[in-house]
Image (cartoon, rainbow, N blue to C red):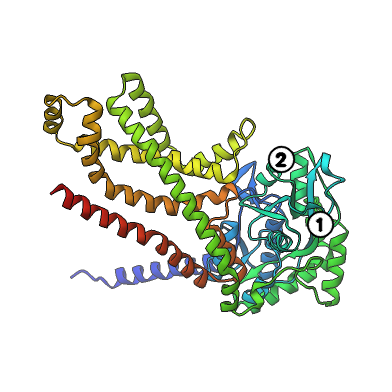
Amino acid sequence: MLNVRPFYFAFALCLLLVSAGHATLFSQTPPLLRWAGDAEGGAPFVEADPADPSRVIGFDVEVAGLIAAGLGRAPRFVEVAFASIDQSIARGDADIGLSGIEDTPTRRTGYAVTLPYYQFREVLSVRSADSERFRTLAALRGRRVGTLTGTIAYDILLAAERDLGIVAVSYEDDVHPYSDLLIGRLDAVLLDNVLAERRRRTTPGFVTHPEAVAVSHYVGVLARGNEGLRDRIDQILREAMKDGRLEAIYRRWKIWNADQSELFSKVLSGAPIPPVTGYQIDSTATLPKWEATRRYLPSLLRAATITLVLSCGAMLVAVSLGVAIATGRIYGSRVVQLMLTGYVELIRGTPLLLQLFVLYYGIAAAVRLPAFLAALLGLALNYAAYESEIYRGALLAVPVGQLEASRTLGFSEFQTLRLIRGPQAFRIALAPMTNDFVALLKDSSLVSVLTVVELIKQTQIFATNLGSWVIPGAICAALYLVMSLPLAALARALERRLRIAGN
């Protein structure tokens, strides 16, 4: 009989060796420090390496590496949209957020925030020809001033809008504020000096005043409950300030200045450092949530009104154009049909967001459309293509026999369309038209990229300042339902009336 014991012994020995090898391998792999940042246009904080786009570079990348080394971990970058970094950290997607994250009362209240590791100044940039006229916010009364949404600069502009009559204009990136400044859509831009200096090197035609409107700092943000890790990171940053490693990083990225010496001295001496100095801004984070909601509710209602007016206007234009396109594709000449088909396929084959960018920024050198008008036209032209397909299908669904009967009775093509084909097609198209309007109501949130502050954008601003999406999200959803449900009820009532009339 075959003795299987040696076989089992050899198999067990192999398993033991493999397990030991894996244990050795894992013991040699350091734990990870997952840090969140946004590499999309994030220089000099975080950006894709031009030599190897799979890597990221930037001074915050080096700060993350410095912290990871001090913790005995390996840094692992996690790409997160800048506006979502706080929420991503709270969810546990990463251990720390580092991407030019500003020190705000909201973050200090709702998160475990590191000590400030870089000091920046909020500075005004104006066209070179206006450098003497517009040196302060007070001088910009009644003027349009742009900045990034969800930043300290935006909070300052909102306060200045109330106190000085400035028109605050919010952007999703730090490129278009300066391009709009140069072509006259803005009179000034308020942003931190790091971003202003970077843009000045690539975009001539404006000057940045060195005087600070306000002073704040960049910090790392960790989730509540991670105070132990935060304290260890603070110690690593203090040591890097003492031995010059942080200064070396900043000098490599050409962002070292006297402000950092001042900050390092305060940090190492233990002096209290307020989140913002130089301009008084309202802090929603210090208010009870329901009081903050009460204060923000008028802004949300105004934004909902903008959303509704924009959507209704765009839908009216889309329906008119859609009817014209559908009619032209059925009754027009061969050339007209080809042109209209090309338009429909072009619009349906490209993203709405791209179309909005082209309308507002792409043709700005020739035609400077106001933001609201560009948003309305962009939505209308996009939805006209989809509406035309609904109407074309509805027109083609009318039985051919009825059309032939109308011709036999001597009706012209226009009379047939107006009296027979059109009314029946309208009944067929009504339900999908209603669906499209509800979809347009929601797609209107995309126009925030054109500086139109509609409902979703205002909700995002509220949530950022409050430090939570629960209450803002619930109010936003309720407002969308209030706007869309009556429309659906009206459409159903109209369908019933048409069905009764048809019978």
- The quadrant holding residue 214 is bottom right
- Classify 389 as above or below 39: above
Q: Which residue is mark 2?
A: 184
Q: Position of residue 418 (x, y in %)?
A: 25, 34
Alpha carbon of mark 1 to alpha carbon of mark 2: how far?
19 Å
Q: Residues within 10 Å of mark 1 (few under 14, many from 20)?
A: few
Determine if residue 229 is in view: no
Q: Is residue 104 left or right of residue 172?
A: right
The residue nearer to you, when weighing 327 against 264, is 327
Q: Secondary structure at mark 2?
A: loop
Residue plotted at (31% across, 28% down):
329
Q: Position of residue 232 (x, y in %)?
A: 69, 75
Going by the numbered disc 2, the residue's amino acid type is: Gly
Going by the numbered disc 1, the residue's amino acid type is: Ala
Q: Residues within 10 Å of mark 2 (few under 14, many from 20)?
A: few
Determine if residue 499 is in view: yes
Q: Position of residue 307 (x, y in %)?
A: 49, 55
Residue plotted at (68% across, 74% down):
108
Q: Secondary structure at mark 1?
A: helix
The disc at residue 138 is 1
